[in-house]
Image (tube, rainbow, N blue to C red):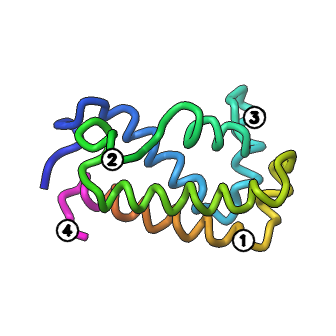
């Protein structure tokens, strides 16, 4: 199993794993408040910037941030779940997204992607 260090941008992979870890949290609202109180940029806007504005996480990222198509597919599932909620209210804030009935799909997809990426970084086959 390849090591994350073999990727061109392993630091972005670390950031991706951290974002996925946050999105799977049941106490995400509290975590975003904690991060904001610590002077960090946090919240749904930051999530959308990371997943849609700053990075594509598509096949073009294989060898750079992701190892293969399985990882692309896992991250795409997170992005699709986020987009689905966005389509219901483009101006929704943190509370709107976290309270949306479909948020569990975001958390579930993030948990699956997180498990895949971290297991592969540890050398565990998935």
Circle 4 sits on which residue?
A: 125
Cα–Cα span, label 4 and label 1: 30 Å
113 with respect to 47 (left or right): left
Circle 3 sits on which residue?
A: 36
Give the residue drawn at x 78%, y 73%: 101
Task: Tell which of 40 and 81 is nearer to you.
Answer: 81
Give the structural element (helix, strand or loop) at label 3: helix
Circle 2 sits on which residue?
A: 59
Give the structural element (helix, strand or loop) at label 2: helix
Neighbor class of circle 2 (other Cα within 10 Å; few <14, some 14-19, many 20+) is: some
Give the structural element (helix, strand or loop) at label 4: loop
Cα–Cα span, label 4 and label 2: 21 Å
Q: Earlier in the sequence, mark 2 or mark 3?
A: 3
Give the structural element (helix, strand or loop) at label 1: loop
Magenta-drawn stretch contains 123: yes
Neighbor class of circle 3 (other Cα within 10 Å; few <14, some 14-19, many 20+) is: few
Cα–Cα span, label 2 and label 3: 33 Å
Q: Where is residue 43 shown, x and y percent of the image?
A: 73, 42
Q: Earlier in the sequence, mark 3 or mark 4?
A: 3
33 with respect to 28 (left or right): right
Q: Earlier in the sequence, mark 4 or mark 1?
A: 1
Cα–Cα span, label 3 and label 4: 36 Å
Furthest residue to the left? 1
Numbered mark located on residue 102 in the image: 1
- Please identify, in this view, whether the residue under mark 2 or under mark 3 is nearer the observer: 2
Q: Quadrant of the N terminus?
A: bottom left
């Amino acid at each position: 199993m390849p090591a994350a260090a073999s990727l061109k941008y392993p630091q972005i992979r670390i950031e991706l794993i951290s974002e996925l870890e946050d999105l799977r949290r049941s106490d995400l609202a509290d975590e975003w408040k904690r991060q904001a109180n610590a002077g960090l940029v946090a919240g749904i806007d930051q999530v959308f910037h990371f997943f849609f504005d700053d990075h594509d996480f598509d096949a073009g990222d294989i060898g750079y941030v992701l190892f293969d198509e399985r990882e692309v597919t896992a991250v795409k599932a997170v992005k699709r779940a986020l987009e689905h909620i966005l389509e219901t209210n483009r101006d929704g804030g943190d509370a709107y997204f976290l309270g949306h009935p479909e948020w569990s799909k975001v958390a579930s997809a993030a948990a699956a992607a997180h498990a895949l990426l971290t297991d592969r970084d540890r050398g565990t086959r998935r």
